Image (cartoon, helix red, strand yellow):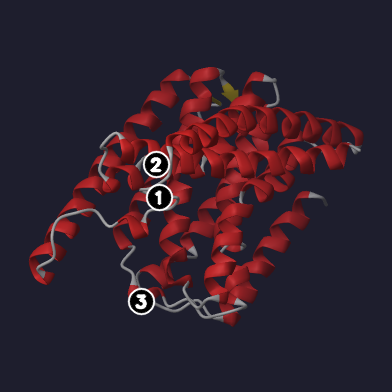
Amino acid sequence: MVWLMAALGLVILLFAGDALVKGAVNLALRIGIPALIVSLTIVAFGTSAPELLISVQAAMSGVPGIALGNVVGSNTANILLVLGIPALIAVMHTAEHDTRKSFVVMIAASVLFILLAFRGVFDWIAALIMLGALALALADMFRDARNHKIAAVVAEGVDGTDDLDDLEGADPDMPWWKIVTFLVLGLIGLPLGADILVDSATVIARTFGISETVIGLTLVAVGTSMPELATTVMAAVRRQADVALGNVIGSNLFNLLAIIGIAALVAPIPVDSQFLTYDLWVMLAASLLLIPFVFLRQNIGRAWGIILIVFYATYVSMMFI
């Protein structure tokens, strides 16, 4: 029954997160916020809402291993699984998208995260540092995106209106009652799903003698990475997986700076020694594996997909030895 409850909590989280994104995106567009800002903020935060609620709930419930494991495990899974599995279906042509700058920012955020972890606790001081770094990264992203759009307008001679087709969940004709319904479902479902999943994961850990940290790094982390994996797999099936690398880098950046940054303002998150000696370094090593795809523009083919998946399976198996 506890496994079913964990699955139920995860399903509620995923559907509620999707509903919140749709509602928030269309609300923002209705009140006149430009699509560019919506895509860089509301969509980015909304798609990370399940991870955020899990970490906040875990911190408040006194199970910091799940809170921290969720973020570190999700970042590792995003690279090794979310890029590895779709590569078995179709080659991802990374040369078509320049992700060098965002990759460097992600690595800098990873190093900052590790340095703060060695303080032994993510408290309000660490939170303010991470959220400040996030604000700087967002401002830089917005400036780059705006300059790119202006350059495209000048080069192609199109008008300056926002292209809503590229904005997830955008529907200019969505009625107000539907927007409100999505927002209500998201705001109710997210904390409910997080509460069920954290409680179930805690029971599973104690029943089977597994540490809460390991549960956070595996069961919870993989579960909350399912939306990214599903999206990337479907893109691979449609032969449109080229943007997956940029999406993973952006998701990992938000996980590091926003989720633990906000959760640490709610309650201090002590850092288990396992993170300092093993898991944080695996996360950083997995991130550095992207160098050939980012700087050398190598495509992510089936061979690379197998390598990434084997690395992840090895990592997970080592935690249970």
Mark 3–mark 1 CB contact (< 8 Å): no
**Toward the viewer: 213 or 81?**
81
Q: Are marks 1 and 2 in contact (CB under 8 Å)?
A: yes
Of the numbered discs 3 and 1, the one sitting upstream in the chain is: 3
Residue 29: horizontal and vertical position, in percent? 32, 41
In which quarter of the view is residue 176 placed?
A: top left
Tell me which amino acid carries mark 1.
Asp
For label 1, the residue is 171
Q: CA distance from mark 1 to mark 2?
A: 7 Å
Q: Residue 26: which disc?
A: 2
Element at badge 3? helix
In terms of image quadrants, where is residue 110? top left
Residue 216 locus on image (x, y percent): 70, 40
In the image: residue 78, left or right of residue 220: left
The residue that mark 3 highlights is: 95
Residue 307 position, x and y percent, is 62, 73
The answer to which image quadrant residue 205 occupies is top right
Query: Could you tell me if residue 112 is visible in this image?
Result: no
Q: Which mark is residue 233?
A: none
